[in-house]
Structures are given as structure tokens and as C-alpha cells.
């Protein structure tokens, strides 16, 4: 499975961006997906996760209420809608996928993921 993120860029504080993560390859398999981010000089951290079926989601406390993860399985794409962006949201954002048997499970731990995209840079600055 190959993952490609898009939608990053420069945005002012308070603005919005919608990131996309599109999968190619054997996409008829069963994958849960997560978004992670890594700011300069910091470790990569969990942002959001979504189950295979899309009905279960989870968020880091720092983004809860501002970010929304969703998926369109027909398009093999997972989205991360980011609103009310803050300078501290500046980071490279990565999507990751892992095979799962369970339709309702999501995963917060980056070490549980098998596949990673190359990342897309989000810069929040005035």
C-alpha cells in the first residue's frame, strides 16, 4: 500500500486546511488509518485515528474540537479537516495505515502502523 498526503501549506492563525491521504496498491484490504505530526525538534505525535468502517474516531487532546478525521472508502481517501489552526499546529503531517480485522477499531500508537506516507508540511503563521 502506498500513501500520499496532500493539502498542506501556509495558513494564518485561525484559518483552515483540509489534508487528504490517498491510498494506492492493494486497497481492497482492510485498513485503519491515523494521522500523526512532527514539529521541528520534536518527536512525532498522534493527531487522529479512524476505524476501517469510519464510525469510530479518536483525537489527541490538543486538536479535539478543532480537527475532524473522516474517510471515503470508495475513493480510498482519508481526510483531516483542520479548523482554528494555531501556530503550535505547525508540523509535517503524516498519514499511516495498518491492516485490521476489526471494523470498529482505531489505533493511537504509531508503532502499530505498517504503512506511512511521505508527509505534507503545514505552517501556521501570520
Image: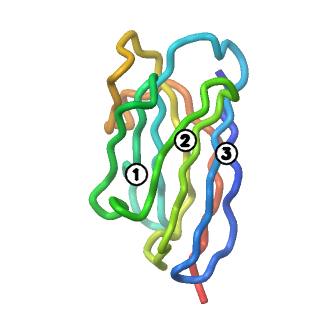
Q: Which residue is mark 3?
A: 5
Quadrant location of residue 25?
top right
**Nearer-the-camera pick, 58 or 121:** 58
**Nearer-the-camera pick, 126 or 91:** 126
x, y (%) of residue 6? Answer: 70, 50
x, y (%) of residue 90? Answer: 52, 70
> On screen, 12 above or below 36?
below
Could you tell me if the residues under marks 2 and 3 are in contact, i.e. CB atoms within 8 Å?
yes
Q: Earlier in the sequence, mark 3 or mark 1?
A: 3
Tag of residue 9: none
- Local secondary structure at mark 2: strand
x, y (%) of residue 30? Answer: 51, 14
- Local secondary structure at mark 3: strand
Could you tell me which residue is drawn at 48 percent across and 32 percent down? 33
Quadrant location of residue 106?
top left
Q: Could you give the CA–CA distance between mark 2 and mark 3, rounded to whole angstroms?
A: 7 Å
Q: Earlier in the sequence, mark 1 or mark 2?
A: 1
Q: Which residue is mark 2?
A: 95
Q: Residues within 10 Å of mark 2 (few under 14, many from 20)?
A: many
- Local secondary structure at mark 1: strand
Quarter of the image for the N terminus: give it: top right
Q: Which residue is mark 1?
A: 47
Could you tell me which residue is drawn at 44 percent across and 58 percent down? 67
Could you tell me which residue is drawn at 55 percent across and 35 percent down? 71
Quarter of the image for the C terminus: give it: bottom right
Amino acid at each position: 500500500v502506498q500513501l500520499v498526503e496532500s493539502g498542506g501549506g501556509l495558513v494564518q492563525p485561525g484559518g483552515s486546511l483540509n489534508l487528504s491521504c490517498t491510498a494506492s496498491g492493494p486497497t481492497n484490504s482492510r485498513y485503519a488509518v491515523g494521522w500523526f505530526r512532527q514539529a521541528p525538534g520534536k518527536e512525532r505525535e498522534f493527531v487522529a485515528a479512524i476505524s476501517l468502517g469510519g464510525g469510530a474516531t479518536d483525537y489527541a487532546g490538543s486538536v479535539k474540537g478543532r480537527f475532524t478525521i473522516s474517510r471515503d472508502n470508495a475513493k480510498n481517501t482519508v481526510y483531516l479537516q483542520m479548523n482554528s489552526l494555531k501556530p503550535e499546529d505547525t508540523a509535517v503531517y503524516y498519514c499511516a495505515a495498518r491492516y485490521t480485522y476489526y471494523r470498529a477499531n482505531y489505533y493511537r500508537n504509531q508503532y502499530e502502523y505498517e504503512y506511512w506516507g511521505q508527509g505534507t508540511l503545514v505552517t501556521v503563521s501570520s
